[in-house]
Structures are given as structure tokens and as C-alpha cells.
Amino acid sequence: MKFKWMMLCVGILTATNVVAEDAKESDAQGIKVEYVDPRDPFEGFNRAMWDLNYNVLDRHIYRPIAHGYKDYVPLPIKSGLNNLVLNLEEPSSLVNNTLQGKWGWAANAGGRFTINSTIGLLGIFDVADMMGMSRKQDDFNEVLGYYGVPNGPFFMAPFFGPYVTRELASDWVDGLYFPLSELTMWQSVVKWGLKSLHARAAAIDQERLLDNALDPYTFVKDAYIQHVDYKVYDGNVPSNQDDDELLDEYMQELE
């Protein structure tokens, strides 16, 4: 976690210079760009970071590594490493589900950690899933969302990708619980790297969809915010009343 925030701070400093240069170039050309998405008040900065992350880092570093990982690392090794990493997060999930009053899922997280840490050899084998205890991991960001704390502005972090402000403000809390609290900085770096690599490899099938999008940045932003809401509401995202009213008015006009 310490590594993550150190890198984020360095990236923000670098990104600020990039945005400043882009702004000077736009002024020189007499071009003024306005952004109107209330969820994304920093869109100028975020788009600059998207270009850095997607067109530079992902294209030349993350994507080749992810494809090599998917194509050449045997599936049992990939599954074992991912299970091991995710098993470390079960205790924090137990706490977060308890804070939301989701007693069944809290017990599920505790049971999964106990079974997989013992019978499953520190979590390498997901024995609990074989016993019908499916994985559902909640982080502290979801706890805040459950109690009505809004997402806050969307933020594209350099090197790390999309976030909402609520995540940035609360992400450190999950690292306070055992066993994450016992990891050294370098162990946390390895854990983050393995988890990110597995997630990036899993997204390979969506690359063509993203590459063909009219505006990949907007596509990712909308998808990510929907993903955050989906997790907070456990898939039962309430409909937007304002959107429903606008749709009703539109249909009435058509009639």
C-alpha cells in the first residue's frame, strides 16, 4: 500500500507537467476545450493520464506482458497465484461485510480464509469454492458507499488506472487488517503486481471492444463507474429517478 501511494504521488507530479504542456499548446492554437460531465470535473487531466496509461504504458509494457502471462504461464500456476493473493484479502472482507450487516457473507469470508489457509495450502487451492463457498470480497470503499457516501469525482491515476475519489480516500483502510498489515512494502508490491497482472490478462478478451470504441476514455469511465455501483449494491443498482423522468417526458413527446 505504501508503494502504491508513493508511485501515485510521483505520477501526479509527472502528470501535472504533461497537462500544463497540453494546456499551453491548446492556448497557442486558440483551442478551448470544455468538459461537462459532473462526475468528471478533472477530465482534462484524466484524459492526459488516459493517453499515458493506455497509449504508452499499456501498449508497450502492460499488454505484451499480459499476453505473455496468459499464453505461456500454465493455468494451474495462474489460478494458484491469484487464489493465494485473494486469500490474503478475506479477513478484511470479513470485517467489511460485518460493518454492512451482511452476516452471511462475513461468515463466508471467515470460513473461506480458514479453509483455504489450511486445507488449501495458504490459499493456493480454492477448496472453499469446491465446498460451495463462493468468493465475494468487499472492501472499505463499499462500506462507505453502502452508508451513502457518494463516489466523488472520477480520477484516472497515472500508472494505476481508474478510481473514484471515495476509493482513493479509503483504500488504505483494508491494509490495516491481518494478514495485509503484516506484509512488508516489497511483499505488498509483489501482491499488487500479481493481482494487477491477473486482472490485465483477464481483460484481454475486451481489448478489441475498447480499441473499436468511438471514445475509449469515456467507454472506460462509464464502465468503471457502473462497476463501482454494481459492487456497492451487490448487483441490484437502483434506477436513476431523474433519468426515468427524462425518459418518460421523451416518450410523451414522441406520442
Image (cartoon, rainbow, N blue to C red):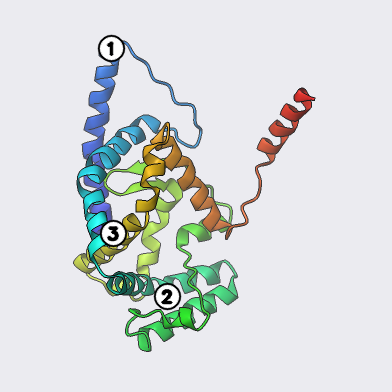
Q: Which residue is mark 2?
A: 91
Q: SS at mark 2?
A: helix
- Please tell me whether mark 3 sits on a helix, a strand or a loop: helix
Is residue 229 found left or right of 125 in the rendered image?
Answer: right
Up/down of 164 relative to 55, above or below: below
Q: Nearer the viewer, residue 117 or 131?
A: 131
Labels 2 and 3: the sequence-earlier one: 2
Furthest-front residue in this view? 71
Residue at the image point whose x is 42% and y is 86% from the top: 115
Residue 179 lies, in percent from the top left, at: 33, 76
Which residue is pictured at 26% across the width and 55% down the height?
67
Along the polypeptide, which appears first: circle 2 or circle 1? 1
Residue positioned 42% across, 75% down in the render = 91
Residue type at the position of mark 1 = Gln
Marking on residue 29: 1
Q: Position of residue 237 (x, y in %)?
A: 61, 52
First in sequence: mark 1 vs mark 3: 1
In this rendering, the answer to whether 215 lies above or below 72 is above
| Residue type beneath disc 3 | Leu
Q: Quadrant of the C terminus?
A: top right
Give the class, few, some or many, for how many residues have Cα within 10 Å of label 2's Cα (few <14, many ≥20).
many
Question: Dividing the picture into quarters, in which one does residue 183 lie?
Answer: bottom left
Camera sees residue 155: no
Q: Is residue 105 in view from this perspective?
A: yes
Location of residue 226 in the rendering, given as x and y in whole percent from the top left corner: 52, 47
Compared to residue 198, the image places residue 207 above or below, namely: above
Q: CA distance from mark 1 to mark 3?
A: 40 Å
- Which quadrant, please, contains the N terminus? bottom left
Q: CA distance from mark 2 to mark 1?
A: 54 Å
